[in-house]
Image (spheres, rainbow, N blue to C red):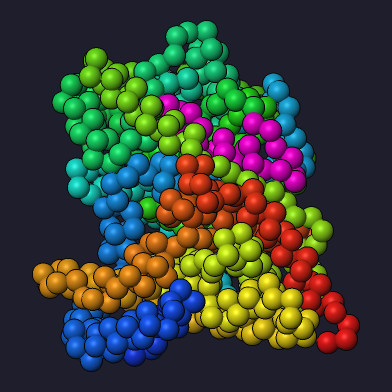
Amino acid sequence: MENQLAKSTEERTFQYQDSLPSLPIPSLKESLKKYLESVKPFANEEEYRKTEEIVQKFQSGIGEKLHQKLLERAKGKRNWLEEWWLNVAYLDVRIPSQLNVNFAGPAAHFEHYWPPKEGTQLERGSIILWHSLNYWQLLRKEKVPVHKVGNTPLDMNQFRMLFSTCKVPGITRDSIMNYFRTESEGRSPNHIVVLCRGRAFVFDVIHEGCLVTPPELLRQLTYIHKKCHSEPDGPGIAALTSEERTRWAKAREYLIGLDAENLALLEKIQSSLLVYSMEDDSPHVTPEDYSEIIAAVLIGDPTIRWGDKSYNLISFSNGVFGCNCDHAPFDAMVMVNISYYVDEKIFQNEGRWKGSEKVRDIPLPEELIFTVDEKVLNDISQAKAQYLREASDLQIAAYAFTSFGKKLTKNKMLHPDTFIQLALQLAYYRLHGRPGCCYETAMTRYFYHGRTETMRSCTVEAVRWCQSMQDPSVSLHERQQKMLQAFAKHNKMMKDCSAGKGFDRHLLGLLLIAKEEGLPVPELFTDPLFSKSGGGGNFVLSTSLVGYLRVQGVVVPMVHNGYGFFYHIRDDRFVVACSAWKSCPETDAEKLVQLTFCAFYDMIQLMNTTHL
C-alpha cells in the first residue's frame, strides 16, 4: 500500500495530457483588430485605408461565415489547428526540407570540459550518446519532469516525437512515422543508426536488458570508424533526404522497387532511436564565435545526415558536437531540453565516464547495404549537387555579446526577450531604412497539443521608437518613453499569443476553411498588405528565443530577402545566430548582428540617462 502511495505522488511526463484545455478560437472582431494594427507599420495612409475597407467587408461578410464554420469544426477536436498546421507548415511543403525547414545547433560542451581537441571524437561520442540514451529511458519511464508555468502544466506531447521518429516523403504530402512507446505502452525500437562516409550501420543499445555503457559504445563506434576509414566510401543514400520532396519520394519508390530488402533497410533507419553522424570536419568554435560550428551542423555533408530524422546527433573530428532536426514533429524547445540535460550530465561528470570499463560480448554493428543501380547513384549525385549549391549560398554570423546579459536588463526592469527583439528592430531599421516585418515564436503549450503562434514584433510603437532613435531632434527623455511604450506593447502581445489570443493561426484557419469549402480566396488574403506585413509566411525576420540555457540554434530565412535570427539569453551574455542568403544583394547577416549589438548599448544608455 505504501508503495502504491509513493508511486501515485510522482508525476509522470504525460499524465496531464488528457486534462489540458482545448485550443481556443479568438473572436473574429478581436483578431481582425489585431491584424489591422500589425499592418500599419508597412502602409501609407491610402494603403491602410484600403485594407481597412477590405477587413470591414470581410468581417461583416464571408469572414463571419468562415468563422462560424471554424467554430463548428473545433467542436469535434481538442486542437482544431493541429492537423492543418502540420500539413500546411511542414508536410505539404515541397522545397528541400533538410536545409529550408530543419533547425540545427551546436552542443555547449566546448564551453567547459570538451574544448575542440583532435582525437577525442570517438571517446566523447560514446559518452554523449550514453547520456542521450539515458534521456530516452527517462522518457520511456515517463520520468522527464512535466514543464509548468507556475503550477499550470504544459503540453508534453512533442517529447514523444524526439526518438524513433521520421518523416517519410510523399508525392504531394509527406507523413510522419513515430515508433516511440512508453514502457507502459509496450515495445519501442532500441537500435541506433550510425552514418559515416556514405555508409550506414545499425546496432542495438540494449544488451541483456541493460543499456550499453560508454566503453561498449566506444567499441561499436571505433569499429565503424576504422571500417569506413580503411575501405571505400559508400553510395551516400542519405543525400536523397536533402532533395526536393517529390523528387525524393519518387527516388524512394524506385529504390524500394529495385529490391524489397531496401524497404526493410529504410524502415530500420526510420524507426531507429536517432541517427549518429560521424563527420571528418573540424569546425572552429569558441564561446564567443559560433559561426563555423553552426554552419557545419546546419549545412554539413548531406551523405551523413538523414534529413527526415527528428534527431541527428552529429560528431566532428575535433570532438565538437551538434544536432540537426526535422522541424515537422516538434519545436526547438524539445531539443533544447535534451541538449541541456546532456550538457549538465557531462559538466557534472567533468566530461568523463566514471563507471566500469568492462565491455560485454556485444554483437558488432551490422552494415545496411542498399541495392543500387546507375539511376540511384545518379539521383544521389543530383541531390548532393543541388544541396551543396544551395548550402554554399548561406551566410551565417553567430556571436556572443558579452558586455552584459539578462542580469542587467532585469535590473533595469526590461524583459530580456523584448530587449533583444527591439534591438533587432532598431538594427534592421538602421540597416535597411524601413521597418522589418518580424515573426517571433510564441508557445501555445497551455493547450492540448499546442505548438506555436506568431507574435509580430514589428509594432507601431516599435517603429515610432526606431524613428526617434534616428532623429537627432528627439530628446533622450522622449526616446526613452517611446522605448518603454514599445516594451509594454510587446510584452502584452506575447502574453496574448501564449493565452491563445493571437490572430495569425486564426486567419490561417479561416483561409483553410474557405479552401476546404471550395470558396474563392477572400480578398483579405490577396491584399498586397497581407504579405507585405508577413502574412502567408513572408516575414523578413524569422526569429525565436532558444531559451535561457547554454543552448543555441539556427534556421534559414523564411524569404530570400530575409534573415533567420535565433538567440539565447544568459545572466552575463546574449548569443545570437543570424542567417541570410548571399545571393540577395541587400541582406547581410554580419552587419545585422553587429548593429543589434550596437542597439543593446544604445538601449541601456537610454535607461542610464540620469536627468530623465
Decide if residue 4 is in sight here.
no
Q: Residue at x 54, y 26 (%)?
A: 278
On whether residue 95 falls in the magenta region, the answer is no
In the rendered image, residue 446, in percent from the top left (x then y), is placed at 46, 75
Decide if residue 573 is in sight here.
yes
Viewer-closest of 293 and 211: 293
The residue most toward the left is 518
In the rendered image, residue 315, in percent from the top left (x then y), is placed at 58, 31
Q: Is residue 276 above or below residue 31?
A: above
Q: Residue at x 39, y 87 (%)?
A: 33
Q: Residue at x 70, y 54 (%)?
A: 594
Q: Is residue 91 above or below residue 384?
A: below
The residue most toward the right is 610
In the rendered image, residue 304, in percent from the top left (x then y), is placed at 46, 28
Q: Quadrant of the C terminus?
A: bottom right
Q: Which residues are magenta?
A: 283-305
Q: Residue at x 79, y 71 (%)?
A: 604
In the rendered image, residue 459, in percent from the top left (x then y), is placed at 53, 77
Viewer-closest of 192 and 279: 279
On whether residue 298 falls in the magenta region, the answer is yes
